[in-house]
Image (cartoon, rainbow, N blue to C red):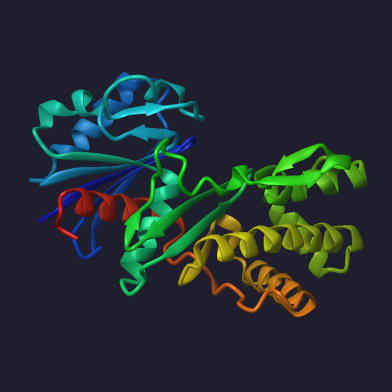
Amino acid sequence: MTIATIDIGGTGIKFASLTPDGKILDKTSTPTPENLEDLLTWLGKCLAEKDYKGIAMSVPGAVNQETGVIEGISAVPYIHGFSWYEALAHHQLPIHLENDANCVGLSELLAHPEIENAACIVIGTGIGGAMIINGKLHRGRHGLGGEFGYMTTIAPAEKLNNWSQLASTGNMVRYVIEKSGQTDWDGRKVYQEAAAGNALCQEAIERMNRNLAQGLLNIQYLIDPDVISLGGSISQNPDFIQGVKKAVDNFVETYEEYTVAPVIQACTYHADANLYGALVNWLQEENQW
């Protein structure tokens, strides 16, 4: 059995043929088309190449599971506001869509099938996430399960009112830009300059790590997961993972009421996590997991 897995992103679209055990048979990609018609045409050509048994999609935005409508807004505005079930119905295949951050979380079930309860934090310009409870994605009543970035924070001096604004890579970079007066910064450069001894960059990273650690401890004591996986491109940097772990350990050592530190690891599949997670979601929805 082969499942067509699709990852819709702001700059590119990925299409892969996956077996139920996660083997990628082939994979292709294209820059994100300028309109829906071109996207559907490209997907149609990909779907015609094999005898697929289903379509699994990872998409930006909140998915209405009953209607197949991608709600909210994203960097690909034309994918919102209509039923994808209807748009792809002529392929006569079972179709399942899921939010991209949720797919990252679900991908960890493929990498670590022993996991029962987990949190996944996707860190980038903001913070997204997913919550796995009893081996299943917890969407919640309003589809907000795992939206950890909306956790309220108190940083009145900086006018930052949620975790996404306070602890994201994007905020770390903004901090360096504001303090240095220079605009040519990104996350990679901040880490490179910190390693070379730049005190401002070191301060910005430590600040981000502390803010992340606070949120991770909150999550640990809210759902007591087996593991918390960190995703986003920054998670591929071992220095980032070690820095966050150290910040968490510092909190646990400083405040005696914290008796359990979260188990923290990098997400397994990195760039292909959305494809793997879309597969897991499809299998679960079809009761084949």
The N terminus, quarter of image: bottom left
- Direction from residue 138 to residue 45 in the image, left or right: left
Residue appearing at x 27%, y 56% in the figure: 280
x%, y% of residue 198? 88, 63
Place residue 276 in its image quadrant.
bottom left
Residue appearing at x 42%, y 32% in the figure: 32
User: Which residue occupies the foreground of this view, 60 or 23?
Assistant: 60
Residue 272 makes an appearance in the image: no
Look at the picture and state if 96 lies above or below 89: below
Instruction: Report the residue that reaches farthest toward the front.
Output: 257
The C terminus, quarter of image: bottom left
Look at the picture and state if 102 lies above or below 76: below
Residue appearing at x 68%, y 51% in the figure: 169
- Direction from residue 213 to residue 286 in the image, left or right: left
Look at the picture and state if 231 lies above or below 268: above
x%, y% of residue 155? 82, 45
Total numbered badges shown on the rendered structure: 0
Look at the picture and state if 152 lies above or below 133: above
Residue 45 makes an appearance in the image: yes
Residue appearing at x 54%, y 56% in the figure: 121
x%, y% of residue 45? 19, 33
- Direction from residue 151 to residue 99 in the image, left or right: left
User: Which residue occupies the foreground of this view, 224 or 171?
Assistant: 224
- Direction from residue 167 to residue 225 in the image, left or right: left
x%, y% of residue 119? 48, 60
Place residue 98 in its image quadrant.
top left
